[in-house]
Amino acid sequence: DIKEPGPNDVLYGRGGGTNHHDGNKRYRKMVELRKEDYINSKRLDKPLVALDIIRQWRTQKPPGRFLKLMDGTGLWHDVGDKKAREKTSQALREKAPLLRQQQKEILQEEAVEENKLGGKL
């Protein structure tokens, strides 16, 4: 059980306290950098993207943890890799349809440009 979360910890919970924690901010950035990998992965490879993020997070110095506040004690405990993977997969899915649509539009624009250039040769 943990009294004081560190800068490499991801805190579970809702609201400002967890959103503004340094570890949560850095974790969200790490997830954001891998979203394109995630949405372009095959279904069976998607969990591997989440597991890779968790592995990277946990190998920090000091090690990164995924912590939840225990009711009534004021102490934090690590939720483990299964819950961490669920949280990470959910974070990777956020705004995924929007990203897919943006990718599709970029590919369509590139195809139009390619056709224009092809016609001039």
Image (tube, rainbow, N blue to C red):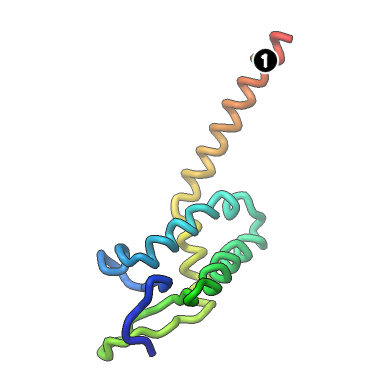
- Residue 93 location, x and y as percent? 49, 56
How many marks on residues? 1
**Residue position marked by numbered label 1 in the rendering:** 117
Image coordinates for residue 38, horizontal then vertical, percent: 58, 55
- The single residue placed furthest to the right in the displayed view is 121
Nearer the observer, 62 or 43: 62
Residue in the picture at 50% in, 44% down: 99
User: For the residue marked with disc 1, what is the amino acid?
Assistant: Leu
Q: Which secondary structure, mark 1?
A: helix
Residue at the location (71% across, 15% down)?
118
Q: Position of residue 41 (x, y in %)?
A: 64, 54
Residue located farthest toward the top when viewing the structure as drawn? 120
Front in this rendered view, residue 96 or 33 = 33
Q: Is residue 14 left or right of residue 55?
A: left
Picture quarter with the C terminus: top right
When asked about the image quadrant of residue 106, the answer is: top right
